[in-house]
């Protein structure tokens, strides 16, 4: 089960695709900034799918100043225009893109109170036939790019004494999915990263939320090479995931499954792994 949108075209540099007049940076801890009550937010993977839905949802809530990141400049600018946001086009898998995006975000927004890391790509098929380049791309985009961006932005949140990082995972990372071995591995690592980081940040005022969707109705499946054909579970709208993201931010939730019943297979796998594997082998 997969979800996140796959950006459509690479960019070698981090640059603003569109932006209002730059705002001066504020000192850590000043200005608005308690997540859930508005502030400054950066959403990655915002060209389409979950990231775009999150951007629109935050804009509709009001009180948020938004910067959006993605690799498809045209689509990113469209979403940014709808959300009244700054568009910062970048391929985060490129060396140094995390630092450049951090600098641009702080220059435009003045501070950062919320990061929603939604960028992701996928590939479906037998692992033995998977091109080596796609392995590197999935691990690079779905895991390493997010880890590096969090590393670049986190010190600013810690210095301010508040903030929240939201990592968009996948059920594939909680239970493993046939035909998506590398994607599942990358998302599993992201979930463990969220747990470890949450423990490390205890007492700093910075929280970490892990939002775990199942199948989401986005262009992800078309772009991964194989469409989603199962009759069950049915895909949920990206807007439902965006609602879960905003609820996690508002209430400081550590982990949210979308839809909520998907927590059950993850619990069964943890409590009775043998039973779970037999069922998974039979029903896929």
Image: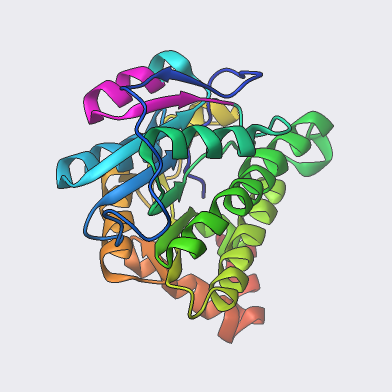
Asked if one can make out residue 180 in the rendered structure from this viewpoint, the answer is yes
Q: Is residue 85 magenta?
A: yes
Locate residue 238 relative to residue 176 in the image: left or right: left
Residue sitting nearer the eye, 35 or 10 = 35
Looking at the picture, tell me which residue is in the foreground, 244 or 204.
Answer: 204
Residue plotted at (61% across, 18% down): 11
Which part of the image, by quadrant, shows the C terminus? bottom right
x and y percentages locating residue 182 in the rendered image = 71, 47
Magenta residues, as a range? Answer: 76-90
Q: Position of residue 30 (x, y in %)?
A: 33, 57
Q: Is residue 21 above or below residue 251?
A: above
Q: Which residue is depicted at the point 76% across and 38% down?
A: 135
- Please identify the residue farthest to the bottom as the structure is shown: 271
Residue 200 appears left or right of 253? right
Q: How is the image coloured?
A: rainbow
Outermost residue toward the top?
A: 74
Between residue 259 and residue 244, name the one nearer to us: 244
Viewer can see residue 235:
no
Q: Is residue 263 left or right of residue 124?
A: left
Examine the structure image and report whether residue 100 is included in the region drawn in magenta: no
The x and y percentages for residue 151 are 63, 53
Which residue lies at the image location 42% right of the left edge and 72% below the top edge? 205
Name the residue: 77% across, 37% down.
Answer: 136
Provide residue 228's location: percent of width, then percent of height.
Answer: 47, 37
Total labels drawn: 0
Query: Does residue 158 appear to the left or right of 244 in the view shown?
Result: right
């Amino acid at each position: 089960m997969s979800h996140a949108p796959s950006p459509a075209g690479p960019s070698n540099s981090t640059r603003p695709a569109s932006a209002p007049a730059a705002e001066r940076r504020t000192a850590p801890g000043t200005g608005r900034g308690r997540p859930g009550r508005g502030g400054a937010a950066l959403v990655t993977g915002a060209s389409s799918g979950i990231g775009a839905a999150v951007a629109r949802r935050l804009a509709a809530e009001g009180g948020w100043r938004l910067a959006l990141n993605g690799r498809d400049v045209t689509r990113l600018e469209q979403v940014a225009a709808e959300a009244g946001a700054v568009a910062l086009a970048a391929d985060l898998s490129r060396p140094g893109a995390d630092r450049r995006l951090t600098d641009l975000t702080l220059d435009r927004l003045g501070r950062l109170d919320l990061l929603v890391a939604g960028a992701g790509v996928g590939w479906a098929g037998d692992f033995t036939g998977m091109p080596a380049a796609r392995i590197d791309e999935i691990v690079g985009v779905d895991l390493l790019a997010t880890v590096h961006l969090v590393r670049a932005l986190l010190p600013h949140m810690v210095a301010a004494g508040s903030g929240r990082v939201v990592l968009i995972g996948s059920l594939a990372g909680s239970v493993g999915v046939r035909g998506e071995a590398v994607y599942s591995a990358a998302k599993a690592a992201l979930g463990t990263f969220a747990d470890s980081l949450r423990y490390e940040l205890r007492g700093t005022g910075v929280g970490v939320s892990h939002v775990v969707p199942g199948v989401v109705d986005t262009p992800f499946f078309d772009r991964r090479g194989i469409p989603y054909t199962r009759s069950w579970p049915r895909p949920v709208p990206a807007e439902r995931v965006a609602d879960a993201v905003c609820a996690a931010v508002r209430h400081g939730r550590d982990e949210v499954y979308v839809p909520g019943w998907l927590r059950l297979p993850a619990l069964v796998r943890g409590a009775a792994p043998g039973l779970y594997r037999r069922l998974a082998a039979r029903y896929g």
